Image (tube, rainbow, N blue to C red):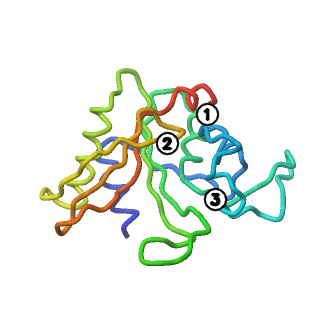
């Protein structure tokens, strides 16, 4: 029900929902996203690697740790302009608590076109937040770093008098665009 509502909101903002595999190779999960081999996110203890390898390449396979893998697959086969969202399960070996679980759902948007700016990104996120949580929601953007975006921000929403991290965002890093 929630996924359908998110698809509806983003559809009204001009985004098409796409899906991709939950079992991934390292190229789509890390390399094409500018996540170098020595990055902590690639630590085998931080991922669910499978005991089998890809039958085509012999490369290790893992459960995807983010839905960004879907964006890479779309950019590999679709020339710009691109305006999509990818929603689905992702897997990280987190200890279960009130805010973490080894499997959770994630939604990511991707907009690749000429003349797209950080102002466009912030506008889409504000429109999404007010459509989903109501007009009284407040959002803020904090500088951050992600290997696949530049510039990068953390987005927080104020709900019931406290700030809650909503997720990361940013402009697609030129390295990522070149890799696809």
Q: Is residue 43 left or right of residue 171?
A: right
- Judging depth in this view, the residue of 98 and 113 nearest the camera is 98
**Numbered tag placed on residue 142 in the rendering:** none
- Residue visible at 24% across and 48% down? 140
Q: CA distance from mark 2 to mark 1?
A: 24 Å
Q: CA distance from mark 3 to mark 1?
A: 18 Å
Residue at (44% x, 55% y) in the render: 107
Callout 1: SS? helix
Q: Which residue is mark 1?
A: 77
Residue 12 position within the rendered picture, expressed as x and y whole percent measured from the top left: 29, 47
- In percent of width and height, residue 153 lies at 37, 43
Tell me: residue 136, above or below residue 175. below
> Circle 2 is placed at which residue position?
146
Q: Position of residue 39 (x, y in %)?
A: 64, 46
Say few, some or many: other residues with alpha carbon within 10 Å of mark 1 (under 14 / 14 to 19 / 20 or more). few
Is 84 or 115 nearer to us in this picture? 115
Q: Is residue 119 left or right of residue 18?
A: left
When asked about the image quadrant of residue 16, the answer is top left
Mark 3 neighbour class, 10 Å CA radius: few under 14, some 14 to 19, many 20 or more: some
Judging by the rendered image, the residue that carries numbered circle 3 is 22
Q: Earlier in the sequence, mark 3 or mark 2?
A: 3
Earlier residue among tags 3 and 1: 3
- Across and down, in percent, residue 61 comes to 76, 55
Q: Are marks 2 and 1 in contact (CB under 8 Å)?
A: no
In the displayed orientation, state which residue is furthest to the left. Answer: 136
Of callouts 2 and 1, the N-terminal one: 1
Name the mark nearer the viewer: 3 or 2.
2
Local secondary structure at mark 3: loop
- 10 Å crowding of disc 2: few (<14), some (14-19), many (20+): some
């Amino acid at each position: 029900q929630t996924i359908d509502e998110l698809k509806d909101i983003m559809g009204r903002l001009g985004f098409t929902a796409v899906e991709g595999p939950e079992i991934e190779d390292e190229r789509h999960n890390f390399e094409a996203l500018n996540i170098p081999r020595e990055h902590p996110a690639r630590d085998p203890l931080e991922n669910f690697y499978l005991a089998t390898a890809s039958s085509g390449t012999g490369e290790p396979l893992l459960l995807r740790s983010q839905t960004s893998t879907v964006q890479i697959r779309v950019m590999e086969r679709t020339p710009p302009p691109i305006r999509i969202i990818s929603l689905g399960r992702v897997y990280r070996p987190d200890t279960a608590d009130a805010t973490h679980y080894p499997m959770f759902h994630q939604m990511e948007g991707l907009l690749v076109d000429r003349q797209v700016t950080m102002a466009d990104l912030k506008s889409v996120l504000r429109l999404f937040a007010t459509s989903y949580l109501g007009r009284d929601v407040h959002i803020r953007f904090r500088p951050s770093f992600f290997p696949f975006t530049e510039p990068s921000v953390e987005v927080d929403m104020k709900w019931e008098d406290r700030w809650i991290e909503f997720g990361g965002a940013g402009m697609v890093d030129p390295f990522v665009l070149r890799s696809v």
